[in-house]
Image (spheres, rainbow, N blue to C red):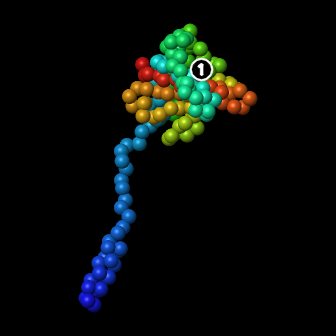
């Protein structure tokens, strides 16, 4: 009986001593999101989201308004330098409603490794757009979200889906 106690104690000590944290290497190469965002993008879909309806749980929260206006005329081109840092942009609206008050200038992001906000700038003017999922960039899809406010409260937002040209 005494030997069994020592054997169990030895097994416990060995199992605790044998547990070490395992270090994992990198999963894959780090993606350069900014470089993937660069290029010419044509608008393929626009979804209008009623924020009040979403907050209150109403059934009609979103509406595809792509064919209401000539949204598919809109093209945005994002340029960058050799390292992938953002430089300039141009928007060709065609007959579509504006997504920005200006059609050219520079663009910057809030975080170079994991951007969430894209700021379009032209002189003293600036327009913020929220970046959608990164997963779509690999398959040639790019999502932006524009928010409209009234009295400081978000009233409606627009989700723009672009396809790389």
Residue 24 in sight from this viewpoint:
yes
> Residue shown at 63%/19% (left/top)?
102
Instruction: Name the residue rendered at 49%, 27% in the picture.
Output: 143
For disc 1, the marked residue is 99
Measured as percent of width and height from the top left, residue 51 is found at 61, 29
Q: Residues within 10 Å of mark 1 (few under 14, many from 20)?
A: some
Residue 112 picture location, percent across and down: 53, 39
Q: Residue furthest bottom?
A: 2
**Left or right of residue 145: residue 4:** left
Q: Toward which corner of the image does residue 111 lie, by quadrant?
A: top right
**97 sits left or right of 4 in the view:** right
Q: Relative to 131, is 15 above or below?
A: below
Query: In what quadrant of the picture does the N terminus appear?
Result: bottom left
Residue 116 x/y as whole percent: 55, 36
Q: Residue at x 42, y 34 (%)?
A: 135
Quadrant into which the C terminus falls: top left
Q: Nearer the viewer, residue 46 or 101?
A: 46
């Amino acid at each position: 009986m005494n030997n069994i106690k020592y054997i169990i104690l030895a097994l416990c000590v060995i199992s605790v001593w044998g547990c070490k944290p395992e270090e994992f290497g990198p999963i894959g190469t780090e993606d350069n999101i900014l470089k993937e965002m660069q290029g010419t993008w044509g608008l393929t879909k626009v979804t209008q989201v009623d924020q009040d309806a979403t907050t209150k749980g109403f059934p009609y929260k979103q509406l595809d308004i792509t064919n209401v206006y000539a949204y598919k005329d809109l093209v945005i081109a994002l340029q960058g330098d050799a390292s992938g840092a953002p430089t300039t942009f141009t928007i060709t609206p065609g007959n579509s409603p504006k997504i920005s008050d200006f059609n050219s200038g520079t663009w910057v992001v809030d975080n170079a490794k994991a951007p969430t906000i894209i700021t379009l700038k032209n002189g003293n003017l600036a327009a913020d757009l929220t970046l959608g999922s990164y997963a779509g960039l690999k398959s040639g899809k790019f999502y932006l979200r524009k928010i409209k406010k009234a009295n400081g409260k978000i009233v409606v937002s627009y989700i723009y889906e672009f396809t790389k040209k």
